[in-house]
Amino acid sequence: GDSVTQMEGPVTLSEEAFLTINCTYTATGYPSLFWYVQYPGEGLQLLLKATKADDKGSNKGFEATYRKETTSFHLEKGSVQVSDSAVYFCALSVTQSGGSYIPTFGRGTSLIVHP
Amino acid sequence: ETGVTQTPRHLVMGMTNKKSLKCEQHLGHNAMYWYKQSAKKPLELMFVYSLEERVENNSVPSRFSPECPNSSHLFLHLHTLQPEDSALYLCASSQDLLGQGAFEQYFGPGTRLTVT
């Protein structure tokens, strides 16, 4: 079946440090890839997405590139802020027979940014 | 109201109680989802409704019963729960367009459920 593997956290950084959170996937078919973020006490919200190979998703200084050859979708940010402290989820979605899209999520990676 | 709303935000119930969680989406989407989020566990997909029909049920115990009366509303009926059912229950919606690619999900804030 489909699966998403994320690096285990927590990831602890100082403000303005460079961030990478690794994500690799296995999927039957041609998935769309997503990063979601969950701030304390809230639900998940979409951070960025990519729907085909070599696409780069970006938002709020975060970027991730869909790498089909390495089945990866690593999340990066050049300079993190304390307000980026949250849990980050990598996810994929593949068309099922009949056309519905069943998503698969990684376990989440907690990011803690210190001033 | 905008986005996806969930009520109640917090719920404490005994093992013999019956309660319901409500989710409403104001986005015009045609698919809705229930997830269970427990500490130190992966996000668990419980139920998926597309065009008001259930398309996925990941072997969830029968003490959880979903209901989707229309494309904007989703309920999760709870009865005779166990303490291990304590978790954050998240609702999400998305727009599924057949053959046009997978679309992102929009999540509500969740209901924090405690079973005593």
Image (tube, grey):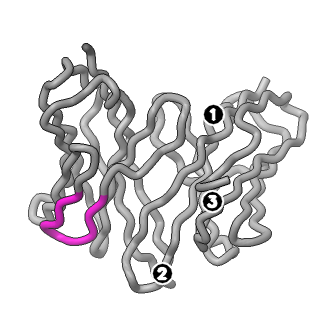
Query: Label 3: which residue?
Result: B47
Taking the spot 71% from the left edge, 36% from the top edge, the residue there is: B9
Residue A27 circle label: none
Chain letter of disc 1? Answer: B
Left or right: B112 in relation to A94: right
In the depicted structure, whether residue A53 falls above or below residue B107: below
Q: CA distance from mark 3 to mark 2?
A: 19 Å
Where does the magenta region start and end? Answer: A49-57
Q: CA distance from mark 3 to mark 1?
A: 16 Å
Q: Earlier in the sequence, mark 1 or mark 2?
A: 1
Q: Residues within 10 Å of mark 3 (few under 14, many from 20)?
A: many
Give a yes or no on whether discs 3 and 1 share a subunit.
Answer: yes
Locate residue A40, reporting x and y percent.
49, 29
Q: Residues within 10 Å of mark 1 (few under 14, many from 20)?
A: some
**The magenta stretch spans residue B112:** no
Q: Nearer the viewer, mark 3 or mark 2?
A: 2
Locate residue A17, reporting x and y percent.
14, 25
In the depicted structure, whether residue A87 falls above or below residue B25: above
Secondary structure of the residue carrying tag 2 is: loop
Residue B87 circle label: 1
Q: Give the quarter of the image for residue A10.
A: top left
Query: Label 2: which residue?
Result: B97
